[in-house]
Structures are given as C-alpha cells and as structure tokens.
Image: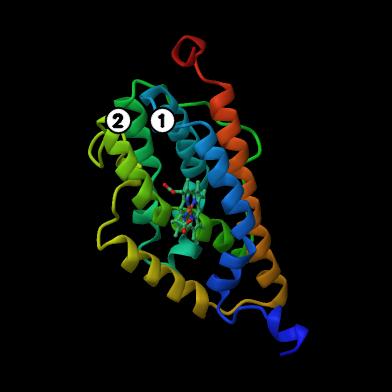
Amino acid sequence: MTAATTTERASLRSQRLNQLTHAPHTELDALVKSHAPFETRESFARFVVAQYLFQNELKALYTNPELIAIVPDLAERCRAEQAGLDLADLNTEIPADFAGAVQNPSLGEAMGWIFVSEGSKLGAAFLIKRAVGLGLSDSFGARHLGEPAGGRAEGWKQFTRILDSLELSPEEEAKAEQGAVAAFERFTELLKHAYATAPKAELA
Ligand code: HEM
C-alpha cells in the first residue's frame, strides 16, 4: 500500500464532505454537549435559537428555484418554520438576525451548506430522544428534530444520491467543500451567540 492509497479521497462527493467535516462535527458535538441542552428547557431553548437562526438563514437556499430544479423537494426539507414554532412552545422570542449569514453562494457552495443542514437531521434522531426527557416531542418544542416525512434514512439517501450525481467543475467542487466547512463554522458561531444572549434570569 502506498501513501497515496492511505490518503485516498473517497470517490463519492458526500463521502468526501463527510470526511472533511468530521473534525468540525466532533468539535460542534462537544460544544453542544458542553451547554447540557437536555438538562433544562431553558438551555434547550438556546440550542433551538441557534437552529432557528441557521435554518432561517438557509431558507433562501431551500427556496431557490435553481436549487429546487436539482433537489425537487428542497423547500419541504427546510426546518425554519418548525424551529420557529418550537421557540413559541418554549416561550422564547424569535431572535433577531445575526450578521454574517451566507449570501448568494455559488451552486457548489450552496450544496455544501445544504449537505450540512440535511446531515444534521441524522444526529437529530439522537437528540429528539433526549428532548423527550424534557417533555418535548416532534409536535411540541422539538418539532425541528422530528423525523422527516418518508423517513430520515430515505431522505438522506435521496439527497446524497442527487448531490453525488451532480456535475461540478473543479472550482465548484472546491466551493462545495468550502461551503460545508463554512456551514459548521457558522453553526458554531450561532450556537455561541445563542447562549451568550440567553435571558439572564433564565440561565442563572
Ligand atoms: C449544523 C450541523 C450539525 C449539528 C449541529 C450536528 C449535531 C450533532 C450532535 C449534537 C450529535 C450528537 C448526538 C448524540 O450523541 O446524542 C450528532 C450526531 C450525529 N450527526 Fe450531526 N450535526 C450536524 C451535522 C451533521 C452532518 C453534516 C452529518 C452527516 C453528514 C451528521 C451526522 C451525524 C450522525 C450520523 C450522528 C450520530 C452519531 C455519530 O455518528 O456521531 N451531522 N450531530
């Protein structure tokens, strides 16, 4: 075996993006857990603030006609509305926009961002089980973590099939990778912001 084969890049784009974001995912997972979001509804509400901001920023991509032409059920995949309803259930105000949202990404870059947002539905299967301990469910407070229509695995399989068969120029391929990494950076920022802006009385 040569060095080249041990460092070989996965052949599928989704697998490459997965590999590339493994470290940021592990870091984000640790950051989420450091806030113990399943200990209290107040802490969970801050996590939902981050989820809402992230999904709301990505709404422009989920509803983009050019992207819907590639992923036909894209608009239905967006969870901004569910996250907004979760905030209401948790007596938490809809947060103001936080500067720094992705703006007019190229096709590859947009797909990188959506890859991360869609992938986060896989981890959500674990998170919703913990949310049940707070008396929450896919119809109250944790709607945005609920199982998508048609199932999590199937939804992910369909998305990655489309992502993997999309023809991209080498430039756009690089943009997809940049988009996926940037999405993790952005969620990390939003999570920090969400906890930093917690109402004092609630988390005291
Ligand atoms: C904003 C983006 C994301 C967030 C906030 C997020 C958050 C999390 C968290 C907190 C867990 C731990 C669940 C637990 O142990 O109870 C988790 C697990 C998981 N996530 Fe993510 N995730 C994100 C993106 C992704 C992406 C892009 C993928 C796949 C491409 C993914 C796949 C998974 C899987 C399969 C698990 C299950 C356990 C594991 O393998 O680590 N997530 N995620």
Residue 25 percent coordinates (x, y):
57, 53
User: Horizontally, is 175 left or right of 194 in the view?
Assistant: right
| Looking at the image, residue 24 lies above or below residue 97 | below
Q: Amino acid at mark 1?
A: Phe
* Element marked by disc 1: helix
Mark 2 or mark 1: name the one nearer the start of the chain.
1
Between 42 and 164, which is closer to the camera in this rendering?
42
Q: Identify the residue at image location x=38%, y=38%.
A: 83
Q: Residue furthest right?
A: 3
Question: Looking at the image, how many numbered discs can be counted on the residues?
Answer: 2
Determine if the C-beta at disc 1 is less than 8 A from ligand 1: no
State whether residue 178 is above or below residue 102: below
Q: Residues within 10 Å of mark 2 (few under 14, many from 20)?
A: some
* Dot 2: element: helix
Residue 102: horizontal and vertical position, in percent?
A: 62, 47
Q: Are marks 2 and 1 in contact (CB under 8 Å)?
A: yes
Residue 134 tag number: 2
Kindly identify which numbered label has been placed on residue 36: none
Q: Residue at x 27, y 37 (%)?
A: 132
Q: Residue at label 1?
A: 44
Q: CA distance from mark 2 to mark 1?
A: 9 Å
Where does residue 98 sit, x and y in percent of width and height? 60, 31
184 lies left or right of 51: right
Residue at 29% x, 30% y is: 134
101 or 117, nearer to the observer = 117
